[in-house]
Amino acid sequence: MPTVKLRLTLAALAATGLALGMTGCNMLTPQATTEEYNPSDGRNGDTGEVAVRNVLLVVDPSDTSRASLSGTFVNNADSAQSIDITVDGTQLQLQLEPGMSIFGSADNQLIVQLADAVAGQTINSTFTAGEGEALSLPLQVISTDVVGYEDLGPTSEPTTDDTETE
C-alpha cells in the first residue's frame, strides 16, 4: 500500500512541475496583447478634442524635399477646431469640421517642405488642437516605391500657413 501512495504523490508532483513549467514563463513575461501599439504604418495620438490617426509622410524618391502628410483627423467636438501642425520646421494650420477629415489622396493633400527626407527615417512633428496639450509624434517617412503608396506622394506645391479644409 505504501507504494500506491508514493506513486500518487510522485504523479501529483510531476503534474505540478509540468503545469509550472508550461505556464511559468507567463508569470515573468508581460502579455503582449495588453500593450497598445500601431499595428500598421503611421502614428496615433490625441490633442484636445482631435484624434490624430495613422499619420505619416510619403515622399517621391525623385524629390525628397517635399512630402505628403497622410492621415486622418477626427474632430470629436460639436464645432470646428483649429489644429496647428509642425513638421520639420514647416508650420500648417487647419480648420477641421466636426467628424473625420482624411488627407493623403491626390485631391486632398497637405504638402510639407523637408530637408531631404529619406524613406525609413522618422521626422519629429507636433500637433496641437485648440487648448489641448501638444502631441509630439515621430512620423515615418515612406517612399512612393512601396506597394500601396504609389499614388500618395506629393503632387502640388507645399501647403502654406492658414490652410483651411473641411
Image (spheres, rainbow, N blue to C red):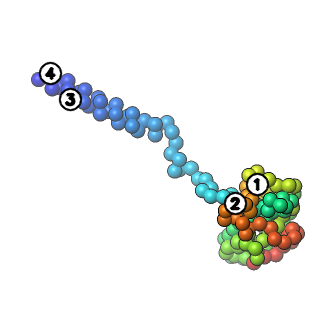
* Residue that carries the numbered disc 2 in the rendered image: 146
At mark 3, the secondary structure is helix
Q: Position of residue 48 (x, y in %)?
A: 72, 64
Residue at (73% x, 60% y) in the render? 145
Circle nearer the viewer, 4 or 2: 2
Q: From mark 4 to mark 2, how far is it between C-alphas?
A: 71 Å
Q: From mark 3 to mark 4, how far is it between C-alphas?
A: 10 Å
Q: Which mark is residue 8?
A: 3
In which quarter of the view is residue 14 placed? top left
User: Mark 2 or mark 1, which has the lower sequence index?
Assistant: 1
Q: Amino acid at mark 4?
A: Pro
Instruction: Kindly tell me whether residue 78 is visible in this rendering.
Output: yes
| Label 2 Cα neighbours within 10 Å, binned few <14 / some 14-19 / many ≥20 | few
At mark 4, the secondary structure is helix
User: Mark 1 or mark 4, which has the lower sequence index?
Assistant: 4
* Residue that carries the numbered disc 4 in the rendered image: 2
Quadrant showing the C terminus: bottom right
User: Mark 2 or mark 3, which has the lower sequence index?
Assistant: 3
* Residue that carries the numbered disc 1 in the rendered image: 119
Instruction: Decide which of 7, 51 is in the foreground and name it.
Output: 7
Left or right of 72 in this view: 117: right
Instruction: Decide which of 30, 159 is in the foreground and name it.
Output: 159
Residue at (66% x, 58% y) in the render? 41
